[in-house]
Amino acid sequence: MDVIAADGLKKHYGATRAVDGIDFAVAAGQTVGLLGGNGAGKTTTIAMLLGLLIPTAGSIHILGHDMERDRFAALARMNFSSPYVALPQRLSVAENLRVYGHLYDVRHTNRRIAELAGELDLTDLLNRPAGQLSAGQKTRVALAKALINRPEVLLLDEPTASLDPDTGDLVRSWLERYRAESGCTILLASHNMAEVERLCSHVLMMKTGRIVDRGTPAELLDRYGRDDLEEVFLDIARDRPRERVA
Amino acid sequence: MIRPVLRRIWGLMYRHLALYRRSWPRLLELAYWPTLTMCIWGLTASFFAARAGSAGAVAFGVLLGGVLLWEIALRTQMGVAISFLEEIWSRNLGHVFVSPLRPWELLAALLALSVVRMAVGVLPAVLLAWVLYAFNLFALGPVLILFALNLMAMGWWVSLGVVSLILRHGAGAEALAWSVLFALTPFSAVYYPVAVLPAWLRPLALALPSAHVFEGLRALMQTGAIAWGHMAWAAGLNALWLGAAALLFLIEFRSARERGALLTIGE
């Protein structure tokens, strides 16, 4: 069963075609990478999936709910994390998580916060204002917020951006474990190709608002005759002809 | 079904109340302007009352009562608009709007917060007016509840208009959060009767619920009678304006989702 289904999705701002007719589906339990350069349409796509942005055309169904007519039923069962959307800086970590525990109607919120704090090594930070945390700590708090409601669908926009390799690896390991344990479906926008190769079973390559290629990381490497996804990304971004690289 | 709704509303309220719990300067700031305004107007009214005999005593009550009641509208309006701006300043809207919180629940939380902020801001000024000038606002009797409810409702619809303008024009419209209701002060007949206004301005004044509330206050203090006609007008106009402002908010919220403004509103 497809947990996320986008059909004929478009977002136009006047003459600018931010997303220009994309179709994709993500099956239950899959982790799919959304790749593309700046301005390719990844963030716009994620914003439409989250209901923050109304598509110009097309439809989105998440967990069987039409996101135009019934988005709140889906939003209660999904969550989102992005380093570009902040949590209130003057609230403590625990207070921030409690706010979202209430918004997502999480039962036994304090117990869930303690559980996440233990798993993401946040216990000592719970009483510290979010604004006083390092980038790595903020990312772990954002991840805890994204997991507070045990989401069935997780949308992640560059979850390890600006993290040092050690913290980035910890976050990726945690995401792998969470997906394996919960069966969560993950859509991940990232510029980190190693991350995508490690986490994603399928990849959607976007350019100028369109999906220009798709497949498993292995299929894409094979198709472009490359050893890593970074080279595939560059081939697509720079329109390098395949016969030259094959 | 009601429990998740109440929890979502409380969740957003908790997010703001937690800030006040740990910051006494924020709490002090809420009471600062109402108290200062009351002190200045109290001294001014005392000065004139001392020179005008018994008529001056009534005028003193009307003036100080007007000042305190107008603060109810001002602080309620700012309570909604500033709480919404806090979400923009903290760049938290992206998280709030992808949670299951419905737009009307967001509004309910903002309105409830505005009542808390207004009470914390205005009650110290009311108590100080009693201590400093022996003016007891509660002596107006139960009709005070009607005055307060009507002025709070006016604060709500004005703030819904402000929030709608912020959704339309972004943070550039945030100055309206502080200024818009002050601009309505001359037409609200807070310190003088509507009859003082030029004839061509009176219809504008009478389209505002506040003008009816203050006409009602003056009638009560001068004659001891409750002006039910004015109360009915105030309530009817508030219902009309609240409906229009809620519709505007829903239109602007949808428009913001179409334009992608919810992602960029703080920039």
Image (spheres, coloured by chain):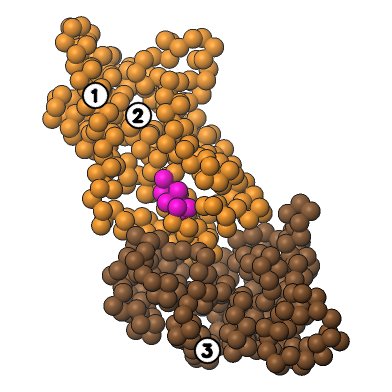
* Residue A198 visible in this rendered orientation of the protein: yes
Q: Magenta stretch: residue B83 in it?
A: yes
Q: For the point 35% across and 82% down, which residue is it?
A: A121
Q: Please state which of the two labelled residues, at mark 1 or mark 2, is closer to the viewer.
A: 1
Residue matched to label 2: B70
Residue B114 image offset from top left, x and y in percent? 37, 45
The magenta span reads B82-89
User: Color used for chain B?
Assistant: orange
- Density class for disc 3 (Cα within 10 Å; few <14, some 14-19, many ≥20) is some
Residue matched to label 1: B40
Measured in 3D between alpha carbons, the distance from the residue under mark 1 to the one under mark 3, in whole angstroms, is 64 Å
* Residue furthest top as drawn: B52
Residue matched to label 3: A176
Q: For the point 42% across and 28% down, which residue is it?
A: B182
> Eyeballing the image, is B151 above or below A97?
above
* Subunit of label 2: B
User: Which image quarter: residue A200?
Assistant: bottom right
